[in-house]
Image (tube, rainbow, N blue to C red):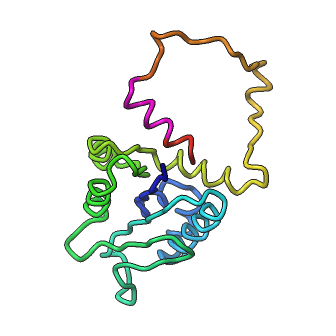
Amino acid sequence: MAVHIIIDGYNLIRQSADLSRLDRQDLEMGREALLDMLVAYKRVKHHRITVVFDGTDAYSLYRQRERVGGIAVLFSRSGETADTVIKRLADREGEGALVVSSDRAVGDYASSRKAATMSSPEFMDRLIMASWPDGKVIDPDRELNGWTPTTRKKGPRRRLSKKERKNRRKILKL
């Protein structure tokens, strides 16, 4: 099952230290840097990606819908927020969607429509990890704490709910 990643663009930009620095300099630079990262991610992972921005911040030169490197870029209409567009997309996609936003209202709405959700900082970590040549990041804390992998089962009392397991499966595809 293919995952359609729906991203709250400005939310993701402002949750990232590097992108928010560019965003403060120039709104256009922040958007372009995010889109460059997403195009690189799409080359590696091949997921369908839609980024939604608030149209009130867009210049009049932009259309409300365009494609950049295979990524759908949507701007909300005037009088409409990006959150409304994301909710509409989550309605349409249902279980096939993964919504990336740290906005609790958007996340709760997407979850109620059976879409998986992920916070913006967590997705940014995935974007950065996908840019590494082998896709693996060495975690120095694991080696310092003496953590060793184990196959010991957790048992049924620690089992996640069915909804959480479905969410986790979609996230693991990233």
The residue at 60%/12% (across/down) is 153
Question: Magenta residues, as a range?
Answer: 161-169
Q: Where 46 sits versus 159, above or below?
A: below
Q: Where 76 sits versus 1, above or below?
A: below
Q: Where 12 sits versus 53, above or below?
A: above
Type of secondary structure dominating the magenta stretch: helix
Residue pushed farthest left? 79
Residue 132: image location, x then y, percent: 75, 54
Given residues 119 and 153, the one toward you in this image is: 153
- Left or right: residue 26 compared with residue 88: right
| Residue 81 located within the stretch drawn in magenta | no
Given residues 6 and 96, the one toward you in this image is: 96
Residue pushed farthest front? 1
The residue at 41%/30% (across/down) is 164
Residue pushed farthest bottom? 61
The residue at 37%/78% (across/down) is 65
Residue 136: image location, x then y, percent: 74, 44
- Left or right: residue 23 compared with residue 102: right
Q: Quadrant of residue 83?
A: bottom left
Q: Where 157 sits versus 174, above or below?
A: above
Q: Quadrant of residue 39?
A: bottom right
Residue 82: image location, x then y, percent: 31, 64
The residue at 44%/22% (across/down) is 160
* Number of marks drawn: 0
- Left or right: residue 85 compared with residue 158: left
Residue 128: image location, x then y, percent: 65, 53
- Left or right: residue 137 compared with residue 165: right
